[in-house]
Image (cartoon, rainbow, N blue to C red):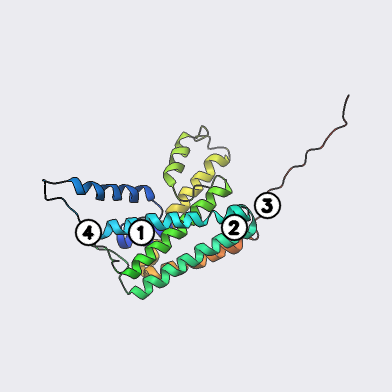
Amino acid sequence: MTGFTDAVMFTAVYIWAGFQTGNTTQLSLAVARLFAGPKGHHDLTFQISDKQALTSLMTFNGGAFIGRLGDKMGPMSRAWLFLGSMIQALFTMAAAIAVWKSGEPSVASDRFNPAWTSALTFVAIGFMSASVGLQGIMGKRVNTQFSTTVVMTTVWCELMADPNLFRLNRYIISRDHKVIGILCLFVGGFAGRALIDQIGSAGTLGIGTGIRVIISIWWLFVPGKVNAKKVKGPETA
């Protein structure tokens, strides 16, 4: 879903929903422009791409903060995993409706001419980023090999550093789950872009909403971890 959501946003505005390293750096460059150029001719404009990056950054963290509610319910409880995933679905649905109502195109012609410029599309950017932010914090709390569902740079580094990287004749969870995560990101991005060409951003986000609902229901049937009971032997003096 990270690749799927990022594909929709990047195609329209060249901003990532989940890559907040890039958005933060972009904002730092916007501040640096204030001090560039000859004296008295500083660039004081806050460009639309900078506004979109700021919107994504703020709403991403807002969505991640909602994930703290899971700490009250139990971050690995079925109730929270279902509820949190449904909230992600609602965010994605809200983004789909906002894009649809805006009536703006889905594909930008170039980086300096984003397809989305209206207030409604800013709302869509916010909801998409919030959904990925909540997804990221929930994945982190689950604490599995798939916990890094947003920042794939970390996964790539851990994969390259894995001591079992070239042991191809064995199934190794620490390595193979990272590979699966990277492949899922690629497939999600590919599917998102392919759908945009056929049905546009709003329709693509609508399909994304359905996928998130399926994920929510899926959590109700995922088997829990079996805690092995220690068998105590007879006490010795």
- Mark 2 or mark 1: which is in front? 1
Give the residue at the far front of this rendering: 40
Mark 3: few/some/many CA within 10 Å (<14, 14-19, 20+): few
Mark pair 2, 1: CA separation: 26 Å
Name the spot of residue 147 as percent of width and height, x first.
Answer: 53, 47
The CA span between labels 1 and 4 is 18 Å
Name the residue: 20% across, 57% down.
Answer: 45
Left or right placement of residue 56 versus residue 28 in this view: right
Q: Where 18 sits versus 203, above or below?
A: above
Apparent side of residue 214 relative to residue 57 in the rendered image (left or right): right
Mark 3 residue element: loop
> How far, Cα to Cα, is label 3 from label 4?
49 Å
Q: Earlier along the polypeptide chain: callout 1 or callout 3?
A: 1
Q: Quadrant of residue 202?
A: bottom left
Residue type at tag 3:
Gly
Q: Residues within 10 Å of mark 1 (few under 14, many from 20)?
A: many
Is residue 208 visible to the viewer in this orientation of the structure?
no
Badge 3 or badge 4: first in the primary sequence: 4
Q: Which mark is residue 112?
A: 4
Is 71 located above or below residue 115 in the figure? above
Amino acid under label 2? Leu
Question: At numbered mark 2, what does the secondary structure look like: helix, strand or loop?
Answer: helix
- Residue bearing mark 1: 55
Please provide percent x and percent y for residue 33.
21, 48
Three-letter amino acid code of the residue under disc 1: Thr
Residue depicted at 51% across the width and 32% down the height: 163
Judged by depth in the image, the label closer to the viewer, 1 or 4, is 1
Give the number of the mark in front: 1 or 3: 1
**Which label belongs to residue 81?**
2
Badge 3 is on which residue? Answer: 224
Q: Quadrant of residue 9?
A: bottom left
